[in-house]
Amino acid sequence: MKVDWKVVAHSEGYKKFKKEILNDCTAQLKPGHKRNPPVLKPSCFNLVNGCTGGYRKNDCWNQPCKQFKYVIDLAKKFSLKLNISVDKILDIWEQNRRYNIYNFYQKYREGDLFKLIEESLQQ
């Protein structure tokens, strides 16, 4: 299934998720932030691929970049399995997310995230 990124970019789930990612990226740019690496450029993150390589070429250490890519890749994977669009998956997840993105989208929760989509589709 081909992803229409224009549709995804206008979905409420994507907007909410992107806002959280960008807030975390911005927090890391502030002086004195505990995770502020020696050099963090705002250009290390883009909204399609997540990470552009950042500080070290082909080795992204920036957690928001990694998280963005992981969640988008997971949504694409589930999109193929369930034959629904990525934007609908992100909408479902973000409507049900009640805590931060790093805890909600942990790898060990993939089964729960899959069930969440299935339950939402049955309603």
Image (cartoon, rainbow, N blue to C red):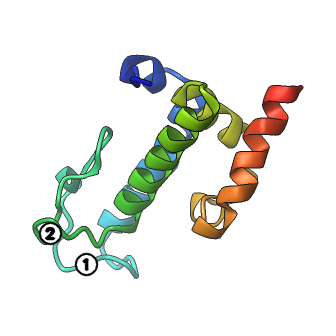
Residue at figure coordinates x 55%, y 25% from the top left: 85
Query: In the visual, does 116 lie left or right of 47?
Result: right
Q: Position of residue 96 (x, y in %)?
A: 76, 43
Q: Secondary structure at mark 1?
A: loop
Q: How many marks?
A: 2
Q: Position of residue 4 (x, y in %)?
A: 40, 20
Type of amino acid under label 2? Tyr
* Front-most of residues 37 and 71: 71
Please say if 34 is above or below 106.
below
Q: Secondary structure at mark 2?
A: loop
Badge 2, how many Cα within 10 Å: few under 14, some, many 20+? Answer: some
Q: Nearer the viewer, mark 2 or mark 1?
A: 2
Q: Position of residue 2 (x, y in %)?
A: 39, 23
* Front-most of residues 83 and 116: 83
Type of amino acid under label 1? Pro
Q: Looking at the image, can residue 75 be seen?
A: yes
Residue at figure coordinates x 29%, y 73% from the top left: 61
Residue tagged 1: 37
* Front-most of residues 87 and 22: 87
- Which disc number belongs to residue 55? 2
Q: Looking at the image, can residue 23 be seen?
A: no
**Which of the marked residues, 2 or 1, is nearer the chain's N terminus?**
1
> Label 2 vs label 1: CA separation?
9 Å
Quadrant location, the C terminus = top right
Q: Position of residue 88 (x, y in %)?
A: 62, 27
Query: In the visual, does 123 lie left or right of 18?
Result: right
Please say if 65 is above or below 93.
below
Residue at figure coordinates x 25%, y 78% from the top left: 37
- Which disc number belongs to residue 99? none
Residue extending furthest toward the left: 57
